[in-house]
Image (cartoon, rainbow, N blue to C red):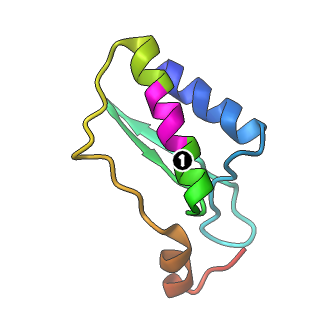
Amino acid sequence: MEGLSGLLKKTKTNGDIHGVQICRNASHVSHLMFADDCFVFFHATAKKEETIANLLKIYEAASEQAINLEKYIISIVEMLIGKLGCHD
């Protein structure tokens, strides 16, 4: 899982994903890890979803760990943030 975290940090540093903010002055969060689960947060676009999918393929090949695609869910965070009344 450390390898996946490193790939996500590099992707964020490269500007390929930006993470999300819960409120205006909050830090950007790109991912959270719990045991063997990873939650990735980003503004959903087709290009960014493709970036994450490619990153997961790289991680899967390098780590020889299988990604459970039944658990692979993309949430459109912008809609949720809008419903909560928080904006960038």
Q: Label 1 sits on what residue type?
A: Glu
Q: Residue 32: x percent and y percent? A: 48, 43
Say whether residue 7 is magenta.
no
Q: Nearer the viewer, residue 30 or 43?
A: 43
The residue pinned by badge 1 equals 50
Q: Residue 27: x percent and y percent? A: 70, 55
Q: Could you tell whether 22 is left or right of 18 in the image? A: left
The picture quadrant where one finds residue 14 is top right
The picture quadrant where one finds residue 63 is top left
- For image coordinates 51% across by 68% down, the residue present is 77
Say whether residue 55 is magenta.
yes
In the rendered view of the protein, which quadrant contains the C terminus? bottom right
Instruction: Determine crowd level at label 1: few under 14, some 14-19, many 20+ residues with C-alpha closer than 10 A.
Output: few
The residue stretch that appears in magenta: 52-57
- For image coordinates 42% across by 16% down, the residue present is 61
Q: Is residue 58 above or below residue 21?
A: above
In the rendered view of the protein, which quadrant contains the N terminus? top left
Q: Secondary structure at mark 1?
A: helix
Q: Is residue 20 above or below residue 50?
A: below
Q: Residue 13: x percent and y percent? A: 76, 37
